[in-house]
Image: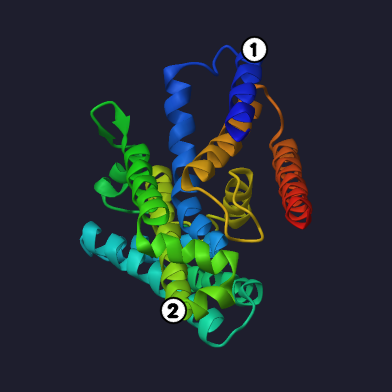
Amino acid sequence: MTFSVLLLMCLVFTLLSSRFLTLSNFQNLMRNTAPLAIAGCGMTAIMIARGIDLSVGSVLAASTVLAASLAVAGVPLYLAFAVALVFGALVGFVNGTIIARLHVSAIIVTLGMLNIARGIAYLISPSAILVGLPPNWSDLGTGKIWVFPLPIVVAMVVVAAFHWLTSYSKFGKRIYAIGGNEEAARLSGINVQRTLVVLYALCGLTAALAGLVLSSRVGSGDPNIGIGFELQVIAAVIIGGTSLSGGEGRILGTVIGALIIGVLSNGLNLAGVEPFWQYVAQGLVLIAAVIIDSRVNEGVLKLGRK
């Protein structure tokens, strides 16, 4: 169904703008969608396990500014990127530990971390966007491998890894078991706490990677980057078919959800629609996806009772 929606949207925007169905616009669309797909992979795994992470936008910003500050200070770029990725994973680890071991609501913990991580970003760069970055800073966001933009290649690698992890590995089976019935998963011998901690750490890692790809393309370290990004990620995951009730979802569905959001934004831009109306459109799409998810779950419950 979601793929049909994506095709319909592409058809509509092709009719509205002659620039939509061009190679340059397609590459631009995919570059813009890549960070959303990358972060969406980590979020999908968490939501399958009936969790959620509201801090990904702030983790993205803090990781980006941390890497940029290290690069400006003369630290080799590969090391600055590695530190940023470790930072993102560490924040996710803290989220997961508090949620799994102290049994605190994921919404409360990650909402608090949203403010903490954003505060860290402003503490690292309190007064301005970090500039004066090394020339190779932009390679990750603007470079190519053959004819494929590097952000797309990175996103494809992450998607492939998470698709295998969730669909074919034993760890993936544990994720679905926890989302389906956490108590039953625990009684069957699954270490629920450890699995959740790993999932939140992976989500922090993918948020940091998405931030590096995004900021590399922009060419600066901005503490304001990623505001509202967590809502776009959650929207992509839900639109892609992952249930809010847990136990159901696919990485490839999230990719389609990310593309729907990307096509919507790109197509509305080409059609000359003001940015404020784009926020309205994205909100309406999210609400529609949640309503559909709710109706599907109700239908499944009714069938189960019969």
Snapshot quadrant of residue 165: bottom left
Contact (CB < 8 A) between labels 2 and 1?
A: no
Which tag, 2 or 1, sits closer to the chain's start? Answer: 1
Q: Residue 53: in sight, yes or no? A: no
Position of 163 relative to 176 (above/below)? above
Residue visible at 56% across and 88% down? 102
> Which of 121/244 is in front?
244
Residue 218 image offset from top left, x and y in percent:
43, 44
User: For this rendering, which residue is in front, 302 or 66?
Assistant: 302
Query: Callout 1: 10 Å neighbours few (<14), some, many (20+)?
Result: few
* Front position in the image: 132 or 201: 201
Residue type for callout 2: Gly
From the image, which quarter does the N terminus lie in?
top right
Which numbered circle lies on residue 292? none
Write the residue at 25% across / 47% down: 136
Left or right of 270 on screen, residue 78 = left
> Which of 194/109 is in front?
194
Residue 165 against residue 116 in the figure, above or below? above
Q: Which of the two marks, 2 or 1, is nearer to us in this view?
A: 2
Query: In the image, 151: left or right of 145?
Result: right
Q: How is the image coloured?
A: rainbow
Residue 229 on image: x %, y %: 58, 53
Q: CA distance from mark 2 to mark 1?
A: 55 Å
> Mark 1 = which residue?
15
Q: Is residue 41 above or below residue 203?
A: above
Give the number of the disc on residue 189: 2
| Secondary structure of the residue carrying numbered label 1 | helix
Q: Is residue 135 left or right of residue 28?
A: left
In the image, residue 246 lies at what x, y percent? 61, 61
